[in-house]
Amino acid sequence: MSHWPYIIASYVLTIGGMAGLALWSWLRMRRAERQAGALSKPLDVRGGRVAQQP
C-alpha cells in the first residue's frame, strides 16, 4: 500500500490548520486594534465619546 495519501493528507491538515490560525489571529488583532482606538478617543463631560472635528 502506498504511503503518499497519508503524507498528502497530513500536509493538507497542517496547511489548513495554519491558515485557520492565521485568519483567526488576524481577526482578533483587528478587533483589539478597534477597541484600543475607541479607548483613545476623548470623553465629553457626560461620559460619551466626542465627535471628531475635521
Image (cartoon, rainbow, N blue to C red):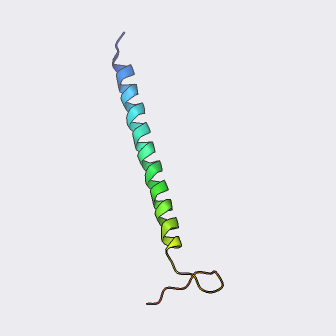
Instruction: Give the residue drawn at x 41%, y 47%.
Output: 22
Measured along the vertical axis of the image, is residue 14 above or below residue 22? Answer: above
Where is residue 13, by image quadrant? top left
**Quarter containing the N terminus:** top left
Check the image and name the residue furthest to the front.
Answer: 45
Taking the image as shown, residue 15 lies to the left or right of residue 46, namely left
Nearest the viewer among 21 and 35 is 35
Nearest the viewer among 46 and 9 is 46
Measured along the vertical axis of the image, is residue 19 above or below residue 38? Answer: above
Measured along the vertical axis of the image, is residue 27 above or below residue 3? Answer: below
Measured along the vertical axis of the image, is residue 18 above or below residue 5? Answer: below
Taking the image as shown, residue 46 lies to the left or right of residue 20, namely right
Check the image and name the residue furthest to the right.
Answer: 46
Taking the image as shown, residue 52 lies to the left or right of residue 7, namely right
Residue 40: percent from left, percent from top: 49, 74
Where is residue 44, by image quadrant? bottom right
Residue 30: percent from left, percent from top: 46, 60
Instruction: Give the residue drawn at x 53%, y 86%.
Output: 51
Check the image and name the residue furthest to the top.
Answer: 1
Residue 43: percent from left, percent from top: 57, 81
Residue 9: percent from left, percent from top: 40, 26
Q: How many marks?
A: 0
Instruction: Give the residue drawn at x 55%, y 85%.
Output: 50
**Quarter containing the C terminus:** bottom left
Nearest the viewer among 3 and 50 is 50
